[in-house]
Amino acid sequence: MILLALVLLGAGGGILLAGLSGRRTVEAAPVTGVDLHHRRLADGILQRLGGPALRRAARMARTATPAHRAATLRQRLDNAGSLRSVEEHLSVKAIAAGGGLLLALAWAIGTDPAPVRLLLAAMAGAGLGFLAPDVLLSRRGEERQRAIGLALPDALDLLALTVQAGLGLEQGIAEVTAELDGPLRDELDRMRKEQQLGRSRRDALEALHTRNASQDLRDFVEALLHAERLGASVGDTLKVQARELRRRRRARAREQAGKAPVKLLFPLVLGIFPAMFVVILGPGAMRIAQALLSR
């Protein structure tokens, strides 16, 4: 089991380092091209010898993952705004599983080194470590998409004003991203840069729709695509969408306020009421008990 944990740690760390080094190589390469042969010769001997093996391990990890599972994982990474690839996330899961396995074995050996206890602890530690990155990724994605939905109505108001003032949609998005902060700014700025690199507006909007799970943002993108297809005014579409999103936000606030009494019921019953009963009925119960015992 210790050997298995070390293998998971080594393989996961190697795949992660291979992905990060490959990303640095792409980011460092200029747009006009680079002589990769001289770049590889400039690398260290360990990187030149171990790089192909690590890249092959990353491809094997991707091949072993079902296509639908890889697509779902890619969508979750996009929702969370993560720049990791699927292979890098799988390597993080392998590292977490190996670390959880080692920690669980150390705890079991220190408390009770029985074989059954060691086996159960190893399974629990490896399972929790393997699932922890997915749980954290899902939570981060939900928080990010919620932040996008909250910031979208104000951004649409500002975007509608810029478009009605005479700016194009791309110039309006540039003005909006200069004023915003947070995940919505990152998504709009990414869409604008994709268009600057030669991508059509429709493709950039569809990519924005694909990599986000916020229903408000998806409705906004679909409205823009529909307006572009029918030749409708973009400014009027933005005003209507901003008004609709504000109505939805007020409806969600009322819904959350309606759920508050139900959510408060369990803390009241389990935490506050017992303490109140002890304070109110405790002295009387003590006097009754003393009166009964004195007879």
Image (spheres, rainbow, N blue to C red):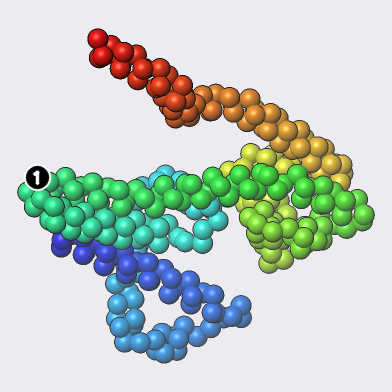
**Horizontal and vertical percent position of residue 187:** 65, 56
Q: Is residue 33 above or below residue 8?
A: below
Q: Determine crowd level at label 1: few under 14, some 14-19, many 20+ residues with C-alpha closer than 10 A.
A: few
Percent from the top left, x then y, of residue 262? 55, 24
Image quarter where the C terminus lies is top left
Q: Is residue 88 above or below residue 18?
A: above
In which quadrant is the N terminus drawn? bottom left
Residue under the point 92% across and 54% down: 165
* Number of numbered discs: 1
Give the camera-side residue of 208 and 265. 265
- What is the residue that sits farthest to the right in this orientation? 165
Percent coordinates x, y for residue 214 in the rendering: 62, 42
Residue 139 versus residue 165: which sits nearer the camera? 139
The residue positioned 34% from the left and 64% from the top of the image is 58
Give the residue displayed 59% in from the left and 80% down from the top.
30
Report the side of 279 relative to 147 (left or right). Answer: left
Q: Report which quarter residue 32 is drawn in.
A: bottom right
Secondary element under disc 1, as helix, strand or loop, is helix
Residue type (three-letter) at the residue carrying disc 1:
Val
Q: Is residue 144 left or right of residue 235?
A: left
Which is more toward the observer, 86 or 179?
179
Question: Is residue 213 at all visible to an observer of this figure?
Answer: yes
List the single residue furthest toward the left. Answer: 114
76, 204: nearer the viewer: 76
- Provide residue 176's location: percent of width, then percent of height: 78, 58
Visible residue check, residue 206: no
Identify the residue position indicated by label 1 in the image: 116
Tell me the residue at 30%/77% (across/down).
50
